[in-house]
Image (cartoon, rainbow, N blue to C red):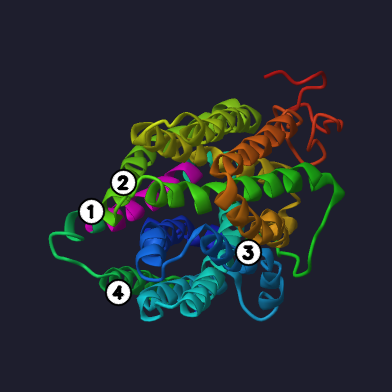
């Protein structure tokens, strides 16, 4: 397969260039993953009879490959990043396609592990390729567009479920096979239709931990713990507490996606204009309020309308996560991007491995306290985000360090 530099790739038609490939990957991956996520709670409750502790265990197992994301560095000794990303997408698609073939507790755990390996290795490599292939000045805008493309693919999956689940009496197996197969097909096309793109800075092939990236590591750790609570328990609450059916909870996901398709590009432009610190402070402040309100559903008996509104708001704030990516792109040594993406993914999943099991047990006692803990984690993230400079760069990673260039303000940063 032909290898091209990014400068040479600029002569290719747009759809065959690096950014075209990123958009194809952004569209292809959610076809399988979004369907798996939309059907999961109903599948495990209706088919396997899972309770809160079981779902917590499942998600802990699902996060093990994320915790071991540094293993990507070993694979990269033998395989290019681009190839690894697409092979991982292929694994995710195949594992999703056969999910309903294993309707037992042990079978669900096993197939989830394989799909998770595909998902987490794909995400690790995809983030690295995005930050290597996108110019810093364009990264927030393009990342917003990539989020929008992913939302469009997810909307396609969810729309099919909402429109055809009851009218065609679809089974879990049919939906998993179609969407997982679609992701696998996109991965195969991308493997053979695109040249190998070579970034200008060769990447380190060993684990990189740098003291000056400490704030990025800390924000990744808290983001992983906080996001895991939402992913595991917010959707589970909708099914267990309010009795949502497959097509009903998928309809909520669709509303989220239609909002994100429009909002994500605008958010990317806003991050580029106003900076990462403001974006992250807004995200974390909003999440504090949302998680406390989730607790209010159990404390005060708030109804299904409040739960749906909170779920939609949380997804809107989630698009602001691209600011953490561009913050790292600005402070990183270019050769550190691939190894740090792997390390960051591992750090992001440290809490995710053990937290769902522990919180699954807490859920049996007090669901509201699970969401209070998430609010506390968001509060910690807010405090740490105050340390991000208005103009971060290599050597000026936090407001506690001294800027190297005139682009960064010498005096105190302001909001």
Query: CB atoms at circles 3 and 1 under 8 Å apart?
Result: no
In this rendering, which labeled residue sits more in front, label 3 or label 1? 1
> Quick check: can you spot residue 260?
yes
Q: Where is residue 212 in the image (x, y as percent from the top left)?
A: 84, 45
> Quick check: can you spot residue 30?
no
Q: Which mark is residue 66?
A: 3
Which residue lies under the disc numbered 1? 162
* Rendered view: 93 above or below 400: below
Q: Where is residue 261 in the image (x, y as percent from the top left)?
A: 36, 42
Which residue lies under the disc numbered 4? 173
* Rendered view: 369 above or below 388: below
- Which comes before the other along the chain, label 3 or label 4? 3
Real-space Cα distance between discs 1 and 4?
16 Å
* Rendered view: 61 above or below 401: below
In this rendering, which labeled residue sits more in front, label 3 or label 4? 4
Query: CB atoms at circles 1 and 2 under 8 Å apart?
Result: yes
**Element marked by disc 2:** helix
Q: How crowded is mark 2: few (under 14 residues within 10 Å), some or many (20 or more)?
A: many
Q: What residue span does the magenta drawing correspond to?
A: 143-160
Real-space Cα distance between discs 4 and 2?
21 Å
Which residue lies under the disc numbered 2? 254
């Amino acid at each position: 397969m032909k290898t091209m530099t990014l400068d040479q790739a600029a002569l290719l038609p747009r759809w065959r260039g690096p950014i075209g490939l990123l958009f194809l990957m952004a569209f292809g991956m959610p076809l399988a993953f979004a369907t798996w996520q939309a059907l999961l709670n109903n599948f495990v409750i209706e088919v396997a009879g899972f309770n809160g502790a079981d779902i917590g265990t499942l998600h802990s197992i699902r996060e093990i490959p994320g915790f071991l994301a540094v293993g990507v560095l070993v694979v990269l000794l033998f395989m290019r990043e681009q190839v690894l990303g697409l092979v991982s997408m292929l694994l995710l698609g195949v594992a999703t396609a056969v999910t309903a073939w294993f309707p037992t507790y042990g079978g669900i755990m096993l197939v989830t592990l394989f799909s998770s390996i595909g998902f987490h290795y794909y995400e690790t490599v995809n983030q690295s390729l995005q930050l290597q292939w996108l110019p810093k000045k364009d990264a927030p805008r393009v990342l917003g567009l990539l989020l929008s493309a992913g939302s469009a693919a997810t909307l396609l999956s969810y729309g099919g479920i909402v429109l055809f689940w009851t009218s065609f009496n679809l089974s879990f197996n049919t939906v998993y096979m179609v969407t997982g197969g679609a992701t696998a097909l996109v991965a195969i096309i991308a493997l053979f239709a695109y040249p190998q793109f070579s970034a200008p800075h060769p990447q380190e092939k060993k684990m990189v931990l740098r003291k000056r990236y400490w704030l990025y590591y800390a924000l990744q750790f808290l983001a992983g713990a906080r996001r895991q609570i939402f992913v595991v328990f917010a959707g589970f609450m909708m099914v267990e507490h309010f009795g949502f059916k497959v097509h009903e909870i998928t309809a909520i996901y669709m509303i989220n996606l239609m909002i994100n398709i429009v909002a994500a590009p605008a958010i990317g432009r806003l991050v580029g204009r106003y900076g990462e610190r403001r974006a992250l402070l807004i995200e974390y402040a909003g999440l504090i309020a949302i998680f406390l309100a989730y607790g209010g559903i159990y404390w005060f008996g708030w109804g299904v309308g409040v739960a749906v509104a909170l779920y939609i708001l949380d997804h809107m704030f989630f698009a602001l996560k691209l600011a953490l990516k561009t913050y790292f792109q600005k402070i990183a040594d270019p050769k550190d991007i691939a190894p740090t993406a792997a390390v960051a993914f591992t750090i992001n999943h440290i809490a995710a491995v053990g937290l769902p099991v522990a919180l699954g047990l807490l859920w049996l006692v007090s669901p509201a306290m699970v969401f209070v803990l998430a609010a506390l984690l968001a509060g910690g993230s807010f405090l740490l985000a105050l340390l991000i400079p208005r103009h971060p760069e290599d050597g000026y990673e936090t407001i506690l360090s001294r800027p190297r260039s005139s682009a960064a303000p010498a005096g105190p940063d302001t909001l």
